[in-house]
Each structure stands twice: as structure tokens, then as C-alpha cells.
């Protein structure tokens, strides 16, 4: 599934080639990918900053997490919708790019972290997890998502 | 290609850009293989932090997000992060322009970005000095008044444009004649 042939097939699809040949589709998709990234970063930071104790310290974490959830999910959907077309049109280049692989690995890890550990800590009754642990969970979350963004940017430089 | 001879309007700035581009620091920055990509990366990361914390505050202002937290609390808690992120994105943005001034000075999308940023700043100040005075009346639980929601909409629209313009800048050369 992850061999060069698959990537070549994807890049050869009519849609992929259409995206590549247009002078404006790829730039616009890329630009909206960044806008979605802004919203995504915001929804993640709202909870992480709260876990770090620098957010809304007089608000229960679960309340903030529940409020952030629709924006987190919506921006993740927007990220995928604007990310997949970019991948399709550049599939053969992405195959070669170490940064694309790093990005995908960090993304998978960040998603798992967000929807298991961070979710559990954020929604658990206040005080069940110590402040130190909550901070660690937030720092890991920020670190993982930042790595996704950094590698995403580097794909464009060194591929 | 759209025919906009933007260069004519920026003749005086062109002279300044030429001068900066010949300074040793500008040349070093431009020719550094590793520094420049990392300046770009830092610009994107600080943008995430800035746009993220601004956009979430705007959603609260529109009355569509984080309604369980009073607006003043959202604003107060996010403010220091917004300022730190603004400082980093300004510094890295300045470095990007410093290293390649000629790329930006006649770039219409660059100037649209600067315009959107200026308008966003005016919007933020206007909100702070006018609408925010009544914040006690709508701080918790209730839909913010139309003035506050207008400020939220303007902020989202302008900052989204800043992000879009930032990413689309390199394409100005293929889309428009400068």
C-alpha cells in the first residue's frame, strides 16, 4: 500500500493532474490549509493553555474542552479536506520527502494523544490528575502538534 | 495574467528596498541555506499561536464559541499569548522582508496583507476603546451586542485574509505583472 506504485497511481489520477496543471487551485487550497491550521491551533491551545494553568484557571477544564471540541473537529475536517488534494497532486514528490513521512507519523501520534490521553485528563473530574501530570500532557500535545506543523512547512522547502 | 503595473507606484520604496538588499545582513540572510527556512518555520508556528488565540477569542465575541466562559476572562487569559506570538511573528516577518526586500516591495499581495493587518489593528483598538466599555452588561452567558459581534466578524475576516495573503504572496509574480 505504501510502495511507489500506489503514489504514482494517485498522482496520475485526472483530479490530481488537474490540480497540478491549474495555476490557482493548488495555491488556494494551500492557503486555506493554513487558515484551517490557525483554527486548529486555537482549539488545541485553548485546552492546553488551560491544562498548563495559564488558560482560564477559574474554569473547569472539562467545560473548556467541551467548548473547544466542535472547533477542534471542524478544523480537523477542514485540514483533511485541504490536505488531501495537496497530497494527491504531489504524491510522487511526497513519497520521496522525509518531512512528509515525519509529518504523517507526528500527525498520527498527535491525533492518538489528543483523543485518548489528553481527552481523558481533560474530561476527568477536577483534581483526579495532579497539576504536574496535566501540564506534561499539555506540553506533549503542544510539542506533537508543533512538530506536525514544522514538518508540514519543511515539505515545501526540501522536497 | 492581470496587468497591474504596481512597480510605478512604489518607486520611492523601490530605492529603499534596493538599499536594504545590498546591506551585508540582508545578503547573509538571503544566502543562508539553513537560516531562512527556519525563519519561515518560526513565522508559521508563531502565526498558529497568534491566529489561534485571536480566532478563538473572536468566536467568543460572536457568541458561537466558549460561551461557558465570560468574554473578559477569555480576553484576559489569551492576551499575553497573543502579544508574545505577535512579537515573534513580527520579528520573523521583518527578517523575511529584510532578507528579500525586492521580492516584497512590488508584490501586490504583500501590500494587501499589510493593509489587512492595519485594518485589523484599527478594529481591535476601536473595539477596545468603544465596545469593550460595556462588557459588564454582556460578559457572561449572553449573546454579545451587535457592536461586539461586528468586531468579531471583522477580526476573523481580516486575519483570515492576512493568513491567505501570506501564503499566496509567492504566486503574485505568476498571477500579476508587477
Image (spheres, grey):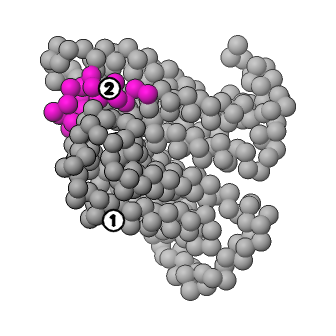
User: Residue A61 sits in which quadrant?
Assistant: top left
Residue at screen point 44% across, 32% down: A71
Picture coordinates of residue B115, whole percent (x, y): 50, 68
Q: Which residues are magenta?
A: A48-70
Picture coordinates of residue B95, whole percent (x, y): 45, 63
With A20 as the anchor, is B97 left or right in this view?
A: left
Give the labeled residue for mark 1.
B126
With A98 as the anchor, is A67 left or right in this view?
A: left
The reply to whether residue A5 is visible in this rendering is yes
The reply to whether residue B40 is visible in this rendering is no
| Secondary structure type for disc 2 | helix
Picture coordinates of residue A64, whole percent (x, y): 29, 29
Of all chains, the one bearing label 2 is: A
Find residue B45 and name its label.
none
Quarter of the picture holding the C terminus of chain B: bottom right
* Magenta segment main secondary structure: helix
Residue A51 painted magenta: yes
Front-most of B11 and B75?
B75
| Secondary structure type for disc 1 | helix
Q: Residues within 10 Å of mark 2 (few under 14, many from 20)?
A: many
Q: CA distance from mark 1 to mark 2?
A: 31 Å
Of all chains, the one bearing label 1 is: B
Give the labeled residue for mark 2.
A65
Residue at screen point 44% across, 28% down: A70
Amino acid at each position: 500500500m505504501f510502495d511507489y506504485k500506489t503514489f504514482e497511481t494517485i498522482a496520475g489520477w485526472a483530479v490530481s493532474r488537474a490540480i497540478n496543471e491549474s495555476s490557482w487551485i493548488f495555491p488556494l487550497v494551500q492557503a486555506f490549509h493554513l487558515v484551517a491550521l490557525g483554527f486548529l491551533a486555537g482549539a488545541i491551545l485553548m485546552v492546553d493553555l488551560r491544562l498548563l494553568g495559564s488558560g482560564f484557571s477559574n474554569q473547569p477544564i472539562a467545560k473548556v474542552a467541551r467548548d473547544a471540541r466542535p472547533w477542534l473537529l471542524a478544523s480537523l475536517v477542514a485540514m483533511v479536506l485541504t490536505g488531501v488534494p495537496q497530497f494527491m497532486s504531489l504524491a510522487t514528490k511526497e513519497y520521496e520527502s522525509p518531512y512528509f513521512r515525519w509529518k504523517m507519523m507526528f500527525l498520527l501520534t498527535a491525533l492518538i494523544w489528543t483523543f485518548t490521553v489528553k481527552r481523558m485528563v481533560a474530561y476527568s473530574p477536577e483534581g483526579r490528575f495532579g497539576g504536574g501530570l496535566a501540564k506534561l500532557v499539555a506540553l506533549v500535545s503542544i510539542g506533537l502538534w508543533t512538530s506536525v506543523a514544522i514538518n508540514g512547512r519543511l515539505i515545501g522547502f526540501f522536497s | 495574467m492581470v496587468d497591474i503595473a504596481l512597480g510605478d507606484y512604489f518607486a520611492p520604496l523601490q530605492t529603499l528596498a534596493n538599499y536594504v538588499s545590498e546591506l551585508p545582513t540582508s545578503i547573509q540572510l538571503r544566502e543562508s541555506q539553513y537560516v531562512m527556512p527556519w525563519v519561515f518555520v518560526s513565522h508559521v508556528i508563531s502565526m498558529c499561536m497568534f491566529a489561534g488565540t485571536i480566532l478563538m477569542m473572536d468566536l467568543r465575541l460572536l457568541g458561537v464559541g466558549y460561551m461557558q466562559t465570560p468574554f473578559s476572562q477569555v480576553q484576559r487569559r489569551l492576551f499575553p499569548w497573543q502579544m508574545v506570538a505577535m512579537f515573534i511573528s513580527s520579528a520573523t516577518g521583518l527578517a523575511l522582508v529584510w532578507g528579500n526586500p525586492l521580492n516584497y516591495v512590488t508584490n501586490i499581495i504583500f501590500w494587501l496583507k499589510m493593509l489587512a493587518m492595519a485594518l485589523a489593528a484599527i478594529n481591535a483598538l476601536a473595539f477596545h476603546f468603544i465596545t469593550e466599555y460595556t462588557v459588564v452588561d454582556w460578559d457572561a452567558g449572553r449573546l454579545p451586542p451587535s457592536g461586539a459581534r461586528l468586531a468579531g466578524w471583522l477580526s476573523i475576516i481580516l486575519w483570515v485574509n492576512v493568513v491567505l495573503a501570506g501564503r499566496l504572496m509567492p504566486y503574485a509574480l505568476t498571477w500579476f505583472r508587477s
